[in-house]
Image: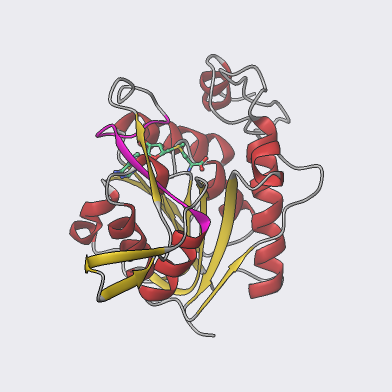
């Protein structure tokens, strides 16, 4: 174990990173959340194989809300030529950088930025954009999805908690002007938890229904949108449709 690995192993993490020596970083949830990370990784890999084949060396990826870099590390290890992670929290950027260096991965950069202020970094477009575990922590999830779309050249994967939807018709100003609902949002209060490492930075969270998410992704410019299959032995929230991973392709 080198010095960087020792530093990583000396504390607890959100993710069980496997380091070059084979050691796995201890997690602060005692392994209770490992399955959600592994399930999403399996789903990501299945989609990568379907959309990109086996050689990723010419591809670039943008990991929005990368946290400590679990998915960025995975993409870098799988051979993506360029991986860019961004997160609002400075401590995650520092942690992701430590993990990258401890793993000896190159071609992976990490920046501190709010997803709504990404223009300032001028990161350009990427073949793959990941938007995992983010939009249900935001008060402007549609804006964040637009950011994801603007930075996407080929495929965007959005993984999120969803709420049960309501459907039906609304008298929109008058009974003469009746409009169908295209989905709905649930409001979750994280105002007391904004210090939490996985939480919202503002505390007001709009969580979409699945119908809302699919409709919005189509409207903001994804030519094809699809809910990805979940392994039967995967994390219960994904298996039971409380969370989803949706793929949006720029070209049909
Ligand atoms: C539940 S964690 C998900 C982390 C990772 N993407 C995953 O799926 O495992 C939410 C992440 O979103 C980040 N975050 C919250 N609000 C953000 C914002 N406005 N812009 C960028 N990142 C944000 C948090 O710092 C945290 O790392």
Q: Where in the figure is residue 63, as x and y percent of width and height? A: 45, 53
* Quarter where residue 220 is shown: bottom left
Of all residues shown, which one is farthest toward the front?
175
Is residue 177 something that shows in the picture? Answer: yes
Nearer to the camera, 212 or 100: 212
**Along the horizontal axis of the image, is 148 left or right of 243?**
left
Question: Which residue is at 47% across, 53% downward?
Answer: 166
Up/down of 59 relative to 250, above or below: above
* Quarter where residue 118 is shown: bottom left
Q: Quadrant of the C terminus?
A: bottom right
Q: Where in the figure is residue 203, as x and y percent of width and height? A: 28, 31
Question: Which residue is at 54% across, 27% downward?
Answer: 14
Of all residues shown, which one is farthest toward the top?
10
Q: Which residues are magenta?
A: 198-210
Is residue 129 something that shows in the picture? Answer: no
Up/down of 80 relative to 102, above or below: below
Nearer to the camera, 131 or 94: 131
Nearer to the camera, 94 or 196: 196
Question: Which residue is at 52% across, 26% downward?
Answer: 4
Q: Quadrant of the N terminus?
A: top right
Question: Which residue is at 40% across, 54% downward?
Answer: 184
Q: How many labels were placed on the picture?
A: 0
Residue 205: in magenta span: yes
Up/down of 166 relative to 215, above or below: above
Up/down of 194 relative to 41, above or below: above
Q: Quadrant of ligand 1?
A: top left
Residue 100: in magenta span: no
């Amino acid at each position: 174990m080198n010095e960087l690995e020792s530093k990583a192993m000396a504390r607890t993490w959100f993710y069980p990173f496997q380091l070059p020596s084979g050691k796995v970083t201890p997690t602060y949830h005692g392994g209770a959340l490992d399955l959600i990370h592994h399930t999403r990784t399996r789903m990501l890999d299945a989609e990568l194989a379907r959309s990109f084949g086996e050689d990723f060396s010419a591809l670039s990826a943008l990991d929005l809300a990368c946290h400590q870099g679990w998915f960025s590390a995975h993409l870098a290890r799988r051979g993506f030529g360029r991986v860019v992670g961004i997160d609002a929290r400075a401590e995650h950027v520092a942690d992701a950088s430590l993990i990258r260096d401890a793993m000896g991965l190159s071609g992976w950069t990490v920046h501190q930025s709010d997803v709504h202020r990404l223009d300032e970094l001028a990161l350009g477009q990427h073949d793959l954009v990941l938007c995992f575990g983010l939009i249900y922590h935001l008060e402007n999830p549609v804006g964040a999805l637009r950011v994801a779309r603007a930075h996407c050249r080929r495929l965007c994967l959005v993984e999120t908690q969803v709420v049960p939807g309501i459907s039906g018709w609304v008298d929109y100003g008058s009974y003469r002007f009746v409009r169908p609902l295209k989905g709905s949002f649930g409001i979750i209060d994280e105002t007391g938890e904004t210090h939490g490492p996985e939480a919202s930075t503002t505390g007001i969270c709009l969580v979409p229904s699945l119908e809302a998410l699919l409709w919005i992704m189509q409207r903001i410019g994804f030519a094809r949108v699809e809910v990805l299959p979940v392994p039967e032995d995967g994390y219960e929230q994904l298996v039971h449709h409380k969370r989803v991973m949706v793929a949006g392709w720029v070209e049909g």
